[in-house]
Amino acid sequence: MKVKLNEQGLVPAIAQDADTGQVLMLGYMNPGSLKRTMEGVQVWFYSRSREDLWHKGEISGNYLNLTEAWLDCDGDTLLLKVKPDGPACHTGETSCFYTPMEQLPEEYEVSETGPGILSELFAVIQDRQRDPPEGSYTAKLLQEGMGRIAQKVIEEAGETAIAAVQDNKEDLPKEVADLLYHTLVLLAASGVTPNQVWKELRNRRG
């Protein structure tokens, strides 16, 4: 069995009432939230707006209690059969799908996000930060503290600049990747999310 993640490292998950069959909501899961859901009782999602794991119902008390999980034929969508403790929608409606669509929409809104691999990698870093596994370089780096992380960012920035000056096209992508990775670790340790960076970059397009 293989779950296919999208370019953000996520898989859509449909929550359906196990008793009535009503579709309650659509959320997104990353490997960390899927692990917590399958190993526990209640459903966890990955919040794209907060860029963090989201325990559904943690604020409202309207938890989704998992009874079954199914994977579709393409391996890229999950169906979660649940027993809800209350309304699934934050508006208080039983289901998030309460708006009838009787005509074509008047407008569309396009979400602007960073490159998918960065979002996926940042989610992994957050997972290592929250639940550090033994032998993980990321977890070790986070445990060593901000000083060590900042030092690594400076080192990788220097190595990136040297590779560029030397016109080393073979090593430059690796050095930039190292710099981006350590920068994401720095953001996670600082409590800053990539979306805040994307917002600043969008402001500089003029």
Image (cartoon, helix red, strand yellow):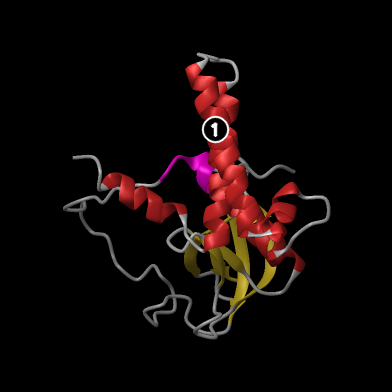
14 left or right, relative to 133: left
Q: Is residue 112 visible?
A: yes
Residue annotated with mark 1: 158
Task: Please tell me which residue is depicted at 55% across the width and 53% down the height of the picture.
Answer: 186
Depth check, front residue: 108 or 189: 189
Task: Please tell me which residue is depicted at 72% across the width and 63% down the height of the picture.
Answer: 131
Indicate the secondary structure of the residue bearing disc 1: helix
Looking at the rendering, which quadrant does residue 188 occupy? bottom right
The image shows residue 185, relative to residue 57, as above or below, that is above
Identified by mark 1, the residue type is Gly
Residue 31 position within the rendered picture, expressed as x and y whole percent measured from the top left: 66, 53
Residue 93 position within the rendered picture, expressed as x and y whole percent measured from the top left: 39, 79
Looking at the rendering, which quadrant does residue 147 occupy? bottom right
Q: Which residues are magenta?
A: 114-119
6 left or right, relative to 109: right
Residue lying at the far right in this picture: please name it: 134
Residue 8 magenta-highlighted? no
Quarter of the image with the N terminus is top right
Residue 174 position within the rendered picture, expressed as x and y whole percent measured from the top left: 60, 27
The chief SS type of the magenta part is helix
